[in-house]
Amino acid sequence: MIRDGTPGISLSMDGSVIGEWTDSRARMLSKTGDGKVRIHGADGEPLYLFSLPGEMVSAEQVSNTEVTLTSEV
């Protein structure tokens, strides 16, 4: 799960936070067609592109601040 917990981004696995980074510009997330997550700033400009290793099993846009990715390594 990738969550925009403004002012930063949190990565979690099985309900536990495994990584975080702060970026006061990050405001929303969007799932790409190929199962990656684009992190956007306040005016919608793309800031980062996040992906998981392995084969993508599923990707769900939960909200504009949360995306869930499942991959098989």
Image (spheres, helix red, strand yellow):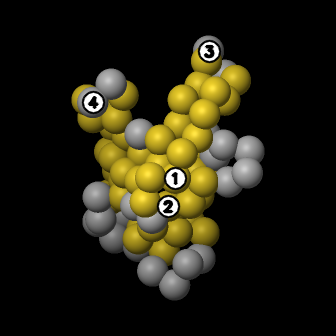
Which comes sooner in the sequence, label 2 or label 1? 2
Are there few (<14), some (14-19), or many (20+) residues within 10 Å of tag 1?
A: some
- Amino acid at the residue labelled 3: Val
Q: Which mark is residue 15?
A: 4
Residue lying furthest right = 34
Find residue 39 and report its horizontal and vertical position in percent: 52, 61
Q: Which quarter of the rendering shows the C terminus?
A: top right
Spatial CA distance of label 4 from label 2 is 19 Å
Residue sitting at 60 percent across and 69 percent down? 46
Residue ID for mark 3 = 73
How many numbered tags mark residues here? Answer: 4
Spatial CA distance of label 1 from label 4 is 17 Å
SS class of the residue under badge 2? strand
| 44 left or right of 5 in image | right
Residue sitting at 59 percent across and 25 percent down? 71
Residue lying furthest top = 73
Residue ID for mark 2 = 29
Find residue 58 and report its horizontal and vertical position in percent: 60, 33
**Nearest to the observer: residue 21 or residue 67:** 67
Q: Which mark is residue 71?
A: none
**CB atoms at circles 2 and 1 under 8 Å apart?**
yes
SS class of the residue under badge 4? loop
Which comes sooner in the sequence, label 3 or label 1? 1
Residue ID for mark 1 = 61
